[in-house]
Amino acid sequence: MNNYYRRFAVAPMLGWTDRHCRYFHRQLSSCAILYTEMINTNEIINSKYNFNIEYNDDKENLVALQLSGNNSTQLAYCSKLAENYGYNEINLNIGCPSYRAQKGYFGVSLMNNAHLVADNIKAIHDVVNIPVTVKTRIGINEQDHYNFLRDFIGTVSQYSGCKIFIFHARKALLSMYNTRKNLTIPPLNYSHVYHLKKDFPSFLVIINGGIETLEEAQIHLQYLDGVMLGRGVYKNPFILSEVDNNIFGLKKKLILYH
């Protein structure tokens, strides 16, 4: 995938960004990267026909599969399967704060174990020829200071080779809030993400969280490599009809597939 396209992406949203949603979004923008819902490796391995990851690559294209899990062998297997289906990127979720994720020790819980994250990413890198990326929070519980985040990202990159990171610019408060509240209540801290780009200038740094308009996106793009919108696109999907022109400088003609 050309990194040019990383300037704008639609966030993975559980219960929303399925193949039908992505098909609709692709009619509005030919350039935005589209992410699947978060899919746990066990769901793929235990699915007889893998219907939950199949997609029509000539109609969607520029699609990233977001995986969750903590078993390197399973992650590698699912990633290779996804590459064979035609996905353009594998993204590992290190941000989900749900009780299920905590119980299964995946999602944001993995921020407590940078070396395991690195092992998982390296295992994926070793079997696929498409980009492997990480989507994470900027902290977990009381581990919300910048040095913790910097060291986490540095360790993951050093031992895995990953240099593309997407940040939901909130920490997760697992003991205080449920999944829904963790999407909005912990305060946004864009400065941590900006600081990371300065400390790791060769990395591709994409920001997510609280961005709802293209005007806001363009401000972030002055300092970072990309932006990711979630609820902003969910509330008003026709934002995407302006992305190709306003973000990528291309004229977009709506394509209606039959």
Image: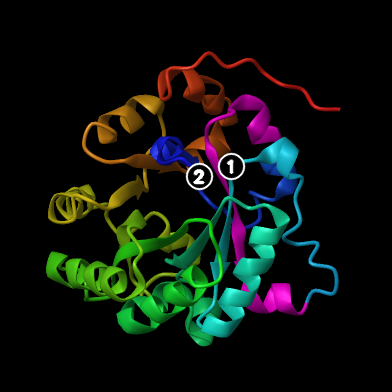
Q: Is residue 138 above or below residue 106?
A: above
Residue that appears at 75% across and 50% down: 55
* Quadrant (top left, top right, bottom left, bottom right) of the C terminus: top right
Instruction: Tell me where residue 166 appears, x and y as whole percent.
Output: 37, 54
Q: Which residue is mark 1?
A: 62
User: Which numbered circle lies on residue 1?
Assistant: 2
Residue type at mark 2?
A: Met
Identify which residue, 184 or 88, lies in the foreground.
Answer: 88
Identify which residue, 239 or 156, lies in the foreground.
Answer: 156
Identify which residue, 89 or 112, lies in the foreground.
Answer: 89
Residue that appears at 68% across and 39% down: 60
Q: Is residue 125 above or below residue 170?
A: below
Circles 1 and 2 in contact, beta carbons < 8 Å: yes
Q: Is residue 40 magenta?
A: yes
What is the quadrant of residue 254 in the picture? top right
Which mark is in front, 1 or 2? Answer: 2
What is the quadrant of residue 163 in the picture? bottom left
Q: Element at badge 2?
A: loop
User: Which numbered circle lies on residue 192?
Assistant: none
Residue that appears at 64% across and 34% down: 25
Left/right placement of residue 145 relative to residue 116 reads left
Left/right placement of residue 19 relative to residue 112 reads right
Q: Residues within 10 Å of mark 1 (few under 14, many from 20)?
A: many
Instruction: Tell me where residue 192 appears, x and y as whole percent.
Output: 19, 55
Magenta-tinted stretch: 23-46
**Mark 1 or mark 2: whose residue is earlier in sequence:** 2
Residue type at mark 1?
A: Leu
Q: Is residue 145 magenta?
A: no
Instruction: Tell me where residue 46 appears, x and y as whole percent.
Output: 76, 79
Identify which residue, 238 or 57, lies in the foreground.
Answer: 57
